[in-house]
């Protein structure tokens, strides 16, 4: 194909070659604008130069290059939103990863004809951020119960998932700290009562509960934030 195009001239006039970069696209001629040549429909698709609409269409079809490009374009935005809301770099990084995993696994629900890919990704990020806040609230409630070693108030029973997670984590502890946590969580004994029951110094009981809570906190945050 010649690198020059023919400019429109009056009937009977001699055609004058002009650079292709100065050819007027029909939609811009009406506005008096000059632009480059229209895209070649036969050219290979390049996600790096695609606009958001084209990138979204490719993403919806399962194009892995489109996923990588979407991550490059908007992961920093997702991370910033998460960091501002959660105030923790590690949580923000996990939210960013979970957002893109959720977007990719749920790409069949994205319709590029009705919405933009960046807006859809941000919407998922907001849900993942809300999940972390909800997880933190549940962990705080359980921690408070264990710290006070008091049974939950009426109407606030610990649900089955909480109990299963706690049971699983307790099984990984050494016998003495496991027994301390069991008496606190399941029997509702105070720290003093546990010390008396097991013949342990009060400081040892508090130390076991403190370390046990740290393990439970990490496990429960992962469990609930991943829901």
Image: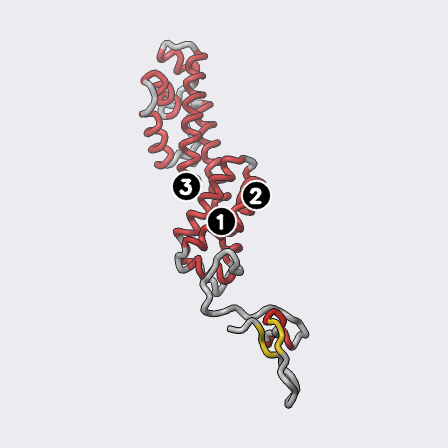
Q: Which residue is depicted at the point 39% across and 57% down? A: 62
Q: Which residue is mark 3?
A: 226
Q: Closer to us: mark 2 or mark 3?
A: 2
Local SS, label 1:
helix
- Tell me which numbered mark, 2 or 3, is placed earlier along the sequence: 2
Residue 126 visible to an observer of this rendering: no
Q: Closer to us: mark 3 or mark 1?
A: 1
Q: Which residue is mark 2?
A: 80
Q: Where's residue 189, x and y in %?
A: 40, 20
**Quadrant of image for the C terminus:** top left
Q: Closer to us: mark 1 or mark 2?
A: 1
Q: Where's residue 82, x and y in %?
A: 54, 42
Indicate whether 25 appears above or below 226: below
CA separation in Å, label 3 and label 1: 20 Å
Q: Which residue is depicted at the point 43% across and 14% down? A: 192
Residue at the right extreme of this rendering: 32
Q: Which residue is mark 1?
A: 71
- Around disc 3, counting alpha carbons within 10 Å, would you say few (fewer than 14), some (14 to 19), or many (20 or more)? some
Residue 86 visible to an observer of this rendering: yes
Q: Which residue is depicted at the point 53% across and 51% down? A: 73
Local SS, label 3:
loop
- Residue 60 shows which numbered tag? none
CA separation in Å, label 2 and label 3: 20 Å
Q: Where's residue 59, x and y in %?
A: 44, 57
- Around disc 2, counting alpha carbons within 10 Å, would you say few (fewer than 14), some (14 to 19), or many (20 or more)? some
Decide: marks 1, 2 in contact (CB < 8 A)?
no
- Tell me which numbered mark, 3 or 1, is placed earlier along the sequence: 1
Q: Nearer the viewer, residue 140 or 9?
A: 9
């Amino acid at each position: 194909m010649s690198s020059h195009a023919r400019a429109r001239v009056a009937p009977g006039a001699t055609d004058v070659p002009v650079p292709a970069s100065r050819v007027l696209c029909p939609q811009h001629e009406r506005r008096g604008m000059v632009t480059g040549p229209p895209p070649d429909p036969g050219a290979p698709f390049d996600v790096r130069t695609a606009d958001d609409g084209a990138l979204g269409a490719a993403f919806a079809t399962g194009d892995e290059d489109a996923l990588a490009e979407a991550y490059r374009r908007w992961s920093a935005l997702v991370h910033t939103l998460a960091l501002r809301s959660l105030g923790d770099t590690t949580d923000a990084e996990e939210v960013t990863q979970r957002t893109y995993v959720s977007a990719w696994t749920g790409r069949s629900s994205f319709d590029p004809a009705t919405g933009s890919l960046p807006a859809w990704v941000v919407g998922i990020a907001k849900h993942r951020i809300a999940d972390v806040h909800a997880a933190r609230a549940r962990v705080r409630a359980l921690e408070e119960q264990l710290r006070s070693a008091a049974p939950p108030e009426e109407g606030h029973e610990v649900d089955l998932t909480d109990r299963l997670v706690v049971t699983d984590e307790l099984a990984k502890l050494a016998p003495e700290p496991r027994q301390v946590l069991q008496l606190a969580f399941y029997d509702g004994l105070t720290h003093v009562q546990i010390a008396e029951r097991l013949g342990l110094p009060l400081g040892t009981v508090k130390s076991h509960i403190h370390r046990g809570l740290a393990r439970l906190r990490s496990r429960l945050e992962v469990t609930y934030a991943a829901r």
